Image (spheres, rainbow, N blue to C red):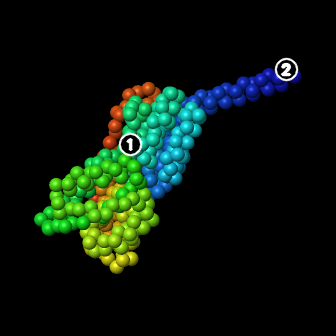
């Protein structure tokens, strides 16, 4: 009887020890709550993949949500991470404004917040610990400089139809401002139309159809804030019997696989790189922040410009 009781006691002790050690292991795992914008573009899909695969590789317990491009859904997700008492919160803000209340709640709960991809406009930048992402203003300047080189020595007018990204989002605001900064002193260039296609292919096609109806062959250049809208616009241009990349020059952003395929087909002239592969930097930064280490407030991703002429040679090495 005694030995049986001893055996039971031993089993319970071992099990408890086992449970404890697994809890201890679980307790060691960083818990990161990530509120993603949505799944609106090829870029976003690659960004989500980078975050999920990097979390796995880094041994991070990732809680992930997709807001379908709605700010209220992102705020809800952040609130749920606060309630779950995660170690770190990270998100890609769908628009720049409207984040102060929920960021104050995270601060009150002593949960650090890391921004990835897009920035926020807040009165107190202690509400977030770090921002990992591209310099969209410089991306816009790169698009403007490419246009200046393309039209070097040529007469105007050079009429630009602009496909804007999500209204109020940092990439849409800054890719526009970067272009305007470069062309403001070159009166050959004129933005004759500008409308949001919300970063989606369907949105880009729909807006381009309207532009073609209103301006037709007056349009010399499409300046699209991302490849998905540019690919939608390319479809609309072809359906109108015009040749994208020749009759209408296509300037785009992201440098996704879709852009390389369009450039290799001669239908897109340039894509300014905007890397979605932010996962590894996010995991490294989250671990440092959770360990109470200091991290740079601003971590800028390194990027370049891909013209159609080099697309075929570059494509095999592309990761997204
Ligand atoms: C840019 C990112 C943008 C991409 C779009 O960092 O926020 O959102 O350019 C995506 O393709 O939808």
Quadrant where the image shows the N terminus: top right
Up-down relation of residue 320 to residue 154 (above or below): above
Total marks shown come to: 2
Q: Which circle marks residue 13 in the picture?
A: none
**x, y (%) of residue 180?**
24, 54
The residue pinned by badge 2 equals 2
The secondary structure type at the circle numbered 2 is helix
The residue pinned by badge 1 equals 119
Residue 123 appears in which quarter of the rendering? top left
- Depth check: give the residue in front, 290 or 319: 290
**x, y (%) of residue 43?**
41, 55
The secondary structure type at the circle numbered 1 is loop
Q: CA distance from mark 2 to mark 1?
A: 67 Å
Residue at 35% over, 34% down:
297
Residue found farthest to the left: 153
Q: Is residue 103 left or right of residue 211?
A: right
């Amino acid at each position: 009887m005694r030995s049986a009781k001893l055996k039971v006691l031993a089993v319970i002790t071992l099990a408890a020890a086992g449970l404890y050690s697994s809890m201890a292991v679980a307790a060691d795992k960083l818990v990161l709550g990530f509120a993603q914008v949505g799944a609106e573009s090829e870029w976003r899909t690659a960004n989500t993949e980078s975050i999920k695969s990097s979390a796995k590789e880094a041994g991070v317990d990732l809680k992930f949500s997709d807001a379908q491009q709605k700010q209220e859904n992102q705020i809800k997700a952040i609130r749920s991470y606060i309630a779950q008492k995660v170690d770190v919160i990270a998100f890609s803000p769908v628009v720049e404004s409207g984040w102060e209340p929920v960021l104050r709640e995270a601060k009150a709960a002593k949960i650090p917040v890391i921004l990835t991809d897009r920035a926020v406009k807040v009165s107190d930048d202690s509400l977030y610990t770090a921002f990992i992402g591209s310099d969209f203003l410089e991306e816009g300047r790169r698009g403007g400089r490419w246009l200046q080189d393309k039209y070097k020595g040529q007469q105007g007018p050079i009429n630009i139809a602009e496909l804007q990204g999500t209204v109020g989002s940092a990439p849409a605001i800054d890719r526009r401002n970067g272009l305007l900064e470069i062309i403001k002193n070159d009166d050959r260039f004129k933005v004759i139309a500008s409308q949001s296609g919300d970063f989606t292919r369907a949105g880009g096609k729909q807006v381009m159809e309207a532009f073609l109806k209103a301006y037709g062959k007056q349009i010399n250049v499409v300046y699209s804030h991302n490849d998905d809208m540019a690919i939608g616009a390319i479809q609309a241009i072809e359906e109108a019997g015009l040749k994208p990349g020749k009759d209408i020059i296509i300037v785009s952003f992201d440098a996704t696989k879709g852009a390389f395929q369009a450039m290799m087909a001669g239908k897109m002239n340039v894509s300014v790189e905007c890397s979605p592969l932010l996962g590894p930097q996010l995991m490294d930064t989250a671990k440092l922040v959770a360990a109470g280490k200091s991290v740079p407030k601003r971590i800028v991703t390194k990027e370049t410009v891909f013209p159609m002429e080099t697309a075929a040679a570059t494509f095999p090495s592309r990761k997204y």
